[in-house]
Amino acid sequence: MPLALARRAARPAAPLPFADADADPQAEWLETRIGNAPLFETPFTGDAGLIPIRTTRALKDASDVFQNGMWQRLDWFLDGQEACFLTAGPVKAAITLRTDPLYGWSVREIVGPGNAPLPPAVERKIVERLGEAGFHRRARSFPL
């Protein structure tokens, strides 16, 4: 087994935000089943600078780093309402795209580690890159 796979296998499953073993006897089964499940296909394959998050485990890890509530919206990622991308390079950012029946896919949020705002020049560059891929920012979102 490759070292990377052995490390993943050794990590405990992340608790699901909606799983409560005391309230639901199937919560443990669900947590095991979905702990490293693939997410819904992203609307953009990404590139060298924008890397899509493709599994629940990667989403949990990113949510812990960026603290933007992605893990609490896990169901939105599982059913294809949201997608997340991480930036490669010196300035780290999490970018979430959200689908809307009227506007299609658009940029929901762009945040740095700890939910910190990014320098405006870095954010502009990310928005420009997403614009080239066909995604636009309609308006800044507010915490749900």
Image: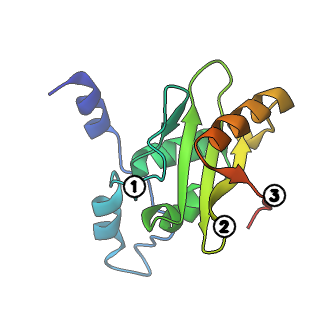
- Name the amino acid type tagged 2: Tyr
- Name the amino acid type tagged 1: Glu
State the separation of the CA atoms marked 3 and 2: 12 Å
Question: Closer to the camera: disc 3 or disc 2?
Answer: 2
In which quadrant of the rendered view does residue 143 lie?
Answer: bottom right
- The quarter in which the C terminus is drawn is bottom right
Chain-order first, disc 3 or disc 2? 2
Q: Residue at x 45, y 58 (%)?
A: 15
In which quadrant of the rendered view does residue 34 lie?
Answer: bottom left
Residue 3: x, y in percent? 24, 23
Residue 73 against residue 68 in the figure, above or below: below
Residue farthest toward the left in the current orientation of the protein:
1
- Name the amino acid type tagged 3: Ala
Give me the disc on residue 103: 2
**Which of the pair 86/57 is nearer the observer?**
86
Chain-order first, disc 1 or disc 3? 1
Chain-order first, disc 1 or disc 2? 1
Query: In this image, 79 relative to 98: left or right?
Result: left
Residue 142 in view here: yes
Callout 1: SS: loop
Residue 118 against residue 32 in the figure, above or below: above
Q: Residue at x 65, y 56 (%)?
A: 106
Mark 2 neighbour density, 10 Å: few (under 14) some (14–19) many (20 or more): few
Which colour scheme appears in the figure?
rainbow
**Residue assigned mark 3:** 139
**Residue assigned mark 1:** 41
Callout 2: SS: loop
State the separation of the CA atoms marked 1 and 3: 24 Å
